[in-house]
Image (cartoon, helix red, strand yellow):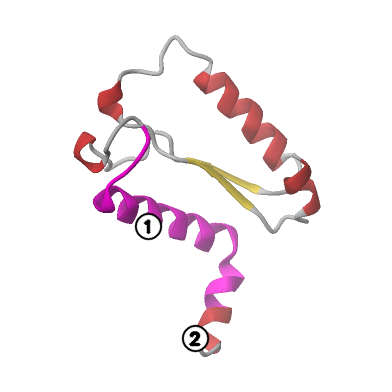
Amino acid sequence: KKIASESNGKALFYLNPYNPAAGSLDGTNHSANIEELRKAVTGEGAAFYDFSTLDGLEAGDFTDASHTLDSGNRKIAAAVLGALKESFPELESKAKTEDVD
């Protein structure tokens, strides 16, 4: 919450995916915890994305319950990029006008 507060709306928080083959998170406090985190972060003006059940990730994209292989990393990176573009559209236009080494 402190980081979100000090970011002045220029922060993005996200939860990493969880391997669906590792079992269900039903019966845990997972959903309630996510909502508490979402409220705390967005209440301070920062963006929050829950990728814990990211569409398109399969068991074969993971090495275990939460660590991904290259294929999973690419899918997560695409989701994070989409979240950044959505939350900070001004960055995309700025990146197009600046030289990148």
Q: Badge 1, how many Cα within 10 Å: few under 14, some, many 20+?
A: few
On whether residue 61 falls in the magenta region, the answer is: no
Residue at the left extreme of this rendering: 60
Which numbered circle lies on residue 25?
none
- The CA span between labels 2 and 1 is 20 Å
Query: Which of marks 1 and 2 precedes in the sequence?
Result: 1
**What residue is drawn where x is 29% and y is 48%?**
72
The segment highlighted magenta reads 66-93
Q: Nearer the viewer, mark 2 or mark 1?
A: 2
**What residue is drawn where x is 43% and y is 35%?**
52
Q: Secondary structure at mark 2?
A: loop
Q: Is residue 52 above or below residue 80?
A: above
Q: Amino acid at mark 1?
A: Ala
- Magenta segment main secondary structure: helix
As drawn, is 41 to the left or to the right of 8?
Answer: left
> To which residue does mark 1 refer?
78
> To which residue does mark 2 refer?
100
Q: In x, y percent, where is residue 50?
A: 49, 38
Q: Amino acid at mark 2?
A: Val
As drawn, is 62 to the left or to the right of 54?
Answer: left
On whether residue 85 falls in the magenta region, the answer is: yes
Q: In x, y percent, where is residue 46?
A: 68, 49
The quadrant holding residue 57 is: top left
**What residue is drawn where x is 40% and y is 37%?**
17
Instruction: State if disc 1 and disc 2 touch (CB < 8 Å).
Output: no
